[in-house]
Structure formats: C-alpha cells, structure tokens
Amino acid sequence: MELKGFLLCLNVCYLTALSTSPQKSEYLHKRIGLGYFRVVAGLNTLSSPGKYAQVRSIRGVKMHDGYNIITSDNDVTLLLLSSPFKFTNYIQPICLPGDVIHEAMLNLSHCFISGWGSTYYKGGKGQTEVELIDRRTCNRVTWYNGIITEKMICAGLESGAADSCQGDSGGPLQCYSENQDRFYLVGVTSFGDECGLPHKPGVYARVSIFSKQNLLHHKSQISLLNTHARTHTLTHT
C-alpha cells in the first residue's frame, strides 16, 4: 500500500497522510502492520514510478499526542523510514519556516498545492497555484464560522476555483520566499468542506507551529503527517 501525499523534510522522515479517517489510520498501522506500506519518492506518474523513483518502508509512526478529532488541531504525525532516501535531482527536501515570526518575515508569495487526489469536482491537475487566506477572513460566518485555529492556515481562491480534494491529504502547501529566493513548506493538507466551493478553501496544518525549532521539547512533531482525511482534490480554473 503506497502513501499518496507526502513531503520530505529530512532523508529519514516524511510528511504525509494515510488518506483515511483517524480511527482507520490507527487501525491500519496497528492491525495490518507497517510492512504493508511503502513510501515512494521521485516519481511523476503514479502508475509508472520510473528509474528515478526510490522506495522505502516505514519503521515507525508517531501520531501527535495533542491531535483533536473534533477540531482537527495538531493534525500531524511523524513517519520514520526504514532507511534514508538518497537526494538527487528528482528527490530533494523542502525548507521549513523556523517559527511563526520567521514565517511572517519570509515575504511569501506564489503558493502551490499538489497531490494525487480526486479531480472529479473541477478536473484539476496534480498541482495548482493558490492564495493564502488570512484566518479572520476564513473564520467569517459564511466561510468556516470560527473553527479555524492558529494551528491552521487556509489557502485557495475565494471563488473555489483552486483547491485540494479527496486523496490529497498530507500533500504540500508550499510558497516562494521573495527574501530567501526559495520555496518553504507552509502547510500540510488537512481538511475542507467538499472541494472547490466558494468561501470554502482548503485548510492546512500550519507548519510554522510545528517547526523543528519548536520540536526540541516535542520530538514527535519533527515531521508531519495529516491523520484526518481531506474530503477534497486539486482543482483549477
């Protein structure tokens, strides 16, 4: 069984999602066993990995102790790989914001989401550009009505024309930093209200809250995996 959405932050740990409910995620790795899962990196076509792909098994899973099934706060989990990936032109780690203050200083723009999820709603491709939406706007009554916490970040378009969907859980929300001239991982796909609806953008676990500088006292957060299935896919105009 392959994990569909992931991000490589170190060569031995992954940000990803099992694309199942929290209860089933726990069931899968405890009852079925980690031996049934594989992490594949370096591929562009899901059905045909190609010669640049690398495959690793998983030796450990650590769900965030503070995950809240009701609010989806702390929707992250650590995956440890059986052996490190070898970095190549096709497999590279992504930078993480040090903390919330660092995130604000990065001058982020040109944000993109990607994943292998459903394209049913608007025929989306594997990646699309989105805009970051401030929490105050996302918490409006006609949007998410106050459920978006400081540990979440909204991204999409007000019209709903760009969004993530079913099967995209654990995929990246990455933004370009004008100051640093590189991309940073800003969010990890968490949940949403269906796919591609106006005023219902995708909601992502906010990486700056769980960055490695804050993980010195919380080692279980050093890499992130969404445990709550996103109920939608990538869509585009």
Image (spheres, rainbow, N blue to C red):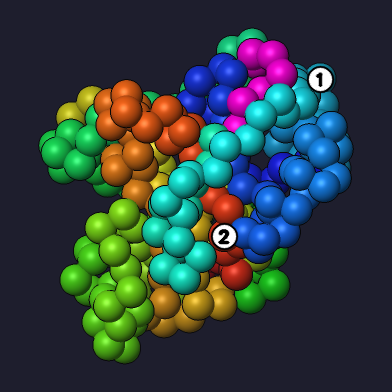
Q: Position of residue 59 (x, y in %)?
A: 71, 25
Q: Name the residue under label 2.
A: 228
Where are the magenta residues, as a range?
79-85
Q: Position of residue 148 (x, y in %)?
A: 32, 68
Q: Closest to the observer: 87 or 69?
A: 69
**Label 2 Cα neighbours within 10 Å, binned few <14 / some 14-19 / many ≥20:** many
- Residue 175 versus residue 118 in the image, above or below: above
Q: Which residue is located at x 62 percent, y 59 percent? A: 22
Q: In which quarter of the image is the N terminus?
A: top right
What type is the residue that disc 1 sits on? Lys
The image quadrant that residue 81 belongs to is top right
The image quadrant that residue 146 belongs to is bottom left
What type is the residue that disc 2 sits on? His
172 with respect to 142 (left or right): right
Q: Which residue is located at x 51 percent, y 65 percent? A: 69
Q: Where is residue 134 in the image (x, y as percent from the top left)?
A: 22, 63
Q: Which residue is located at x 27 percent, y 26 percent? A: 213
85 with respect to 45 (left or right): left
The local secondary structure at tag 2 comes to: loop
Instruction: Tell how many labels.
Output: 2
Mark 1 vs 2: CB contact within 8 A: no
